[in-house]
Image: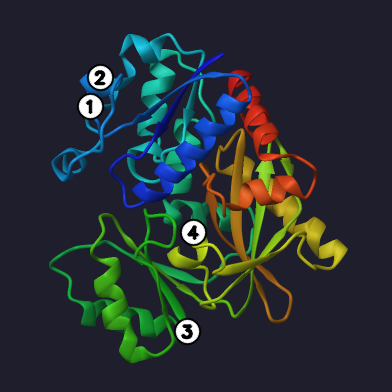
Amino acid sequence: MKIVVLKGGASSEREVSLNSGTNIANALKENGHDVLCLDTVLPIEQIKSPMKPTQKMIRNGDRNLATLLSAPEVQSAKFIFNALHGGSGENGAIQAILQTMGLKFNGSGVEGCAITMDKIVSKVIFEKHGIPTPEWLCFRNDENRQNAEIIETILAKFQPPLVVKPAHEGSTVGLTIVRDVKSLDSALKVARKFNGSILVEKFIEGRELTVAILGDKALPIVEICPKHGIYDYECKYMHGMSEYRMPAEVEPMLTRLIQDWTVVAFKALNCSGYGRMDLRLSLDHKPYFLEMNSLPGMTSTSLVPKAAKTVGISFNELLEKIIKLGLNR
C-alpha cells in the first residue's frame, strides 16, 4: 500500500525522530510498500525534492502541518506512519488533524497522546487506578516565581535523591537526578528552559525496567543497564552506552503484576495500538511506574523492537502489526 512516513519535526526530539523515520521507511520499503518519507519542517513545495532543513525552517516549526497533510501526495496514501516524537507529533495535535481528515495512522488517538504527553495528568490517573508511582510535586513554570521559593516547597515534602524534569518533554530531555540539596537550583534552571510545568518526584533507587504494549497485551519486560547509571539521552541513543536484559530477570508473579498494571494504565490513559511503560523496581522489589510513551522510538537502540524480538517478532513484522492495528482502529 502507499504509506507516508512523518519524521523530524521541530521538537527537542527531532534527531531521534529522524532516525526512527528513516528506519521505518527503509523497513516498509523492504516489505514492498510504496513509501513517501516527509520531514514536517520542510515547506510543502519540497515534498518531491526534499533538502536539508535550515534553522529558519526549524524555528518556524510544524505550524503548517494541516497544509502539509492536505497535499495530494499525502491524501492519496492509505496509511500515515507517524514517527514524530515530542511536540505536536505526540501531544495529540497531529492526531487531531489526521482524525479530522479521515486518515488512518499508527498509535494512540488524540486523547491518549495528549494525556501521556502530560506527565502530571498521567501521575494523577496512575494514583486514581491504584498504580504505584513515586511521590511527586509539580510547579507552573512561572517566570515570576523564584527557584528559592520552589526549593523551599520541595524540601518541605521530601529530601534528595529527587528527579527534576519538564512535565511535557520526552527522551529525558531536561531531566536531572538531584543527589543533594545544593544541586536543586541548577536542576530547576535546566527544567525551566522548557515550556510547561515542572515535575519533581522522589528518585527510586533500583533497576530500570520497561514494558511494551502491542495491541492489548504486554510484551516481556526489558531491563536497561545504562553506563551512566541513569537512562539518559546518550545512553538511550548511542550504541554501546546501555546493556539490555531480555527478558528481565524478575520473579514470575511480580512480572505478571507489572504487566497487568501496565495494561491497566494503557487503557486508563486512553492509549491504543502500541506503547511503552517506563518504571523503576526498587531495591526491595516494589515497582514504581513513571510514564507511558504513546509513540515509542523505532531507532536501532529502541526498546519496543527489542521487546518484540524476545517473542520472535522482527522489526519488519512489528511495523506490519502496528499498521494493522491502526487500520482497524
Which label sits in the foreground, 4 or 2?
A: 4
Residue located beneath label 3 in the image: 161
* Badge 2 vs badge 1, beta-carbon distance below 8 Å: yes
Residue located beneath label 1 in the image: 64
Label 3 to label 1, Cα distance in Å? 42 Å
Looking at the rendering, in which quadrant would you find the C terminus? top right
Q: Earlier in the sequence, mark 1 or mark 4?
A: 1
Q: Residue at x 23, y 63 (%)?
A: 193
Which label sits in the foreground, 4 or 3?
A: 4
Kind of residue indicated by mark 1: Asn
Q: Give the percent coordinates (x, y) of residue 304.
A: 63, 48
Q: Earlier in the sequence, mark 4 or mark 2?
A: 2
- As drawn, the label of residue 237 is 4
**Secondary structure at numbered mark 1:** loop
Q: Residue at x 26, y 59 (%)?
A: 194
Kind of residue indicated by mark 2: Thr
Residue located beneath label 2 in the image: 67
Q: Nearer the viewer, residue 180 or 197?
A: 180
Left or right: where 103 falls relative to 287: left
Mark 2 packing: few (<14 Cα in 10 Å), some, or many (20+)?
Answer: few
Mark 1 packing: few (<14 Cα in 10 Å), some, or many (20+)?
Answer: some
Label 4 to label 2, Cα distance in Å? 32 Å
Kind of residue indicated by mark 3: Pro
